[in-house]
């Protein structure tokens, strides 16, 4: 009995950018990107593909799959760090675009953990009000926040959106548990400044443009440790063994991180859904896009135990378990 996912949807920008195309933008090569990250292509937004527009389309598809009307939605949350405007939120734009006239709406900034933190939030709202239906979306147009002179970051990220409609079910299915954590002390390792301050007293001394900056090696180590820790803590507190998990849908950072995590958790490769070679790291959108693809391909059956885990800027990280 609890919060179930009633439907999923996703939306990717049309333009596909290959590693070879990036060779003419920054000093890199296809071979380096493939061996270090496993990424082959990523999607890049064009006209009409702002974060909220991708989010709204993913939401429409999730609503259709769930057979839920926009008017039934009570809350819209968009996990994003690349809204096209600082205010209003992407969630408010989505609320208007899809006609969710009975919903309140806001964005959630937890970087790559945005969708999982949103899932946890929806679970709490729905457990207090069983009539509530919640739309959780992860959406990014990170191409607008990349420094295309910085080869450490610009090759890694991509754009896209994924959405899930959540509601209450009195069956034995639903969210089993979550384990979420943050550590703000390590913010410098992965961050993105806001606009340059117009108040000289608040100007940042080391403002380096409103782009993603990352110490890749350090982030790599923390990401593995944090995701492994969250997964183990959650399974232990729920008394569930990894053997009884049917599918793992991790944040799609890159294949090297995922392979290391698979090894550390001693997971069979076939149980882990990976689509990062096609889309790169889409931050908050990565888990819901992967979930929608796994769901659409028939990889998740009713009653399956699905495990999610994420890690992102903040640092923010966590894991969630759901009986589908
Ligand atoms: O959602 C969570 C967000 N972040 C992540 O998940 C990323 C975590 N980090 C990683 O996955 C890896 O650190 C990367 C894939 C980002 C980088 O791989 P790495 O093996 O840690 O490489 P590195 O940063 O230590 O760089 C090794 C070399 C350097 O050259 P030198 O100093 O050895 O001459 C870099 O300048 O590779 C160079 N390099 C590149 N070369 C070609 C860095 N980026 C590139 C590039 N193309 N795009």
Image (cartoon, rainbow, N blue to C red):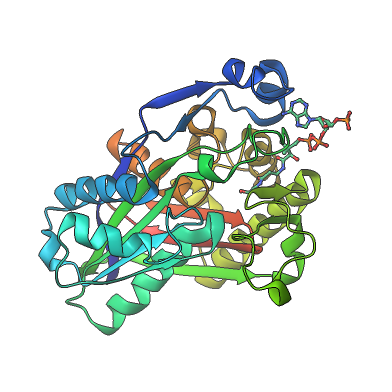
Residue 90 visible (yes or no): yes
Picture quarter containing residue 197? bottom right
Of residue 116 and residue 152, the one placed in the foreground of this image is: 152
Residue 304 visible (yes or no): no
Q: Quadrant of the N terminus?
A: bottom left
Q: Quadrant of the C terminus?
A: bottom left
Answer left or right for 178 relative to 56.
right
Q: Is residue 285 above or below residue 73?
A: above
For the image, the number of numbered tags is 0
Picture quarter containing residue 15? top left
Q: Quadrant of ligand 1?
A: top right
Answer left or right for 313 relative to 170.
right
Of residue 221 and residue 285, the one placed in the foreground of this image is: 285
Q: Which residue does the image show at 65% across and 73% down from the upper left? A: 199
Answer left or right for 68 relative to 195.
left
Q: Is residue 118 above or below residue 156?
A: below
Picture quarter containing residue 318? bottom right
Where residue 242 appears, x then y in whole percent? 55, 53
Where residue 243 appears, x then y in whole percent? 52, 49
Q: Is residue 236 above or below residue 287?
A: below
Where residue 234 appears, x then y in whole percent? 56, 66
Q: Which residue does the image show at 11% across and 65% down from the upper left? A: 71
Q: Is residue 303 above or below residue 317?
A: above
Of residue 161 and residue 224, the one placed in the foreground of this image is: 161
Q: Which residue does the image show at 62% across and 34% down from the upper left? A: 255
Where residue 212 appears, x then y in whole percent? 65, 49
Q: Which residue does the image show at 36% across and 66% down from the upper left? A: 88
């Amino acid at each position: 009995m609890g919060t179930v996912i009633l439907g999923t949807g996703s939306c990717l920008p049309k333009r596909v950018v290959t590693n070879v195309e990036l060779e003419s933008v920054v000093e890199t090569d296809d071979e380096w990107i493939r061996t270090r990250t496993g990424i082959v292509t990523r999607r890049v937004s064009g006209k009409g593909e702002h974060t909220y527009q991708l989010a709204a389309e993913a939401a429409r598809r999730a609503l259709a799959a769930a057979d839920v009307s926009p008017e039934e939605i009570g809350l819209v949350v968009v996990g994003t760090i690349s809204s096209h405007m600082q205010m209003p939120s992407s969630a408010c734009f989505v609320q208007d675009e899809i006609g969710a006239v009975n919903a309140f709406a806001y964005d959630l900034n937890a970087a790559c953990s945005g969708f999982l933190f949103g899932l946890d939030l929806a679970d709490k709202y729905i457990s207090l009000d069983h009539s509530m239906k919640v739309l959780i979306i992860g959406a990014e147009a990170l191409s607008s926040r990349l420094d295309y002179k910085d080869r450490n970051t610009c090759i890694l990220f991509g754009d896209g959106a994924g959405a899930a409609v959540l509601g209450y079910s009195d069956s034995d299915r639903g969210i089993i548990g979550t384990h979420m954590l943050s550590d703000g002390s390590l913010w410098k390792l992965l961050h993105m400044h806001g606009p340059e301050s117009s108040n000289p007293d608040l100007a940042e001394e080391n403002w380096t443009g409103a782009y993603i900056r990352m110490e890749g090696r350090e982030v790599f180590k923390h990401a593995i440790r944090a995701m492994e820790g969250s997964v183990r803590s959650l399974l232990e507190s729920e008394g569930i063994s990894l053997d009884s998990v049917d599918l793992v849908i991790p944040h799609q950072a890159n294949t090297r991180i995922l392979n290391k995590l698979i090894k550390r958790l001693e997971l069979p490769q076939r149980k882990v859904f990976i689509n990062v070679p096609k889309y790169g790291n889409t931050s908050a959108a990565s888990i819901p896009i992967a979930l929608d693809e796994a769901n659409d391909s028939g990889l998740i059956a009713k009653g399956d135990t699905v495990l999610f885990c994420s890690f992102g800027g903040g640092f923010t990280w966590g894991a969630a378990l759901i009986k589908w």
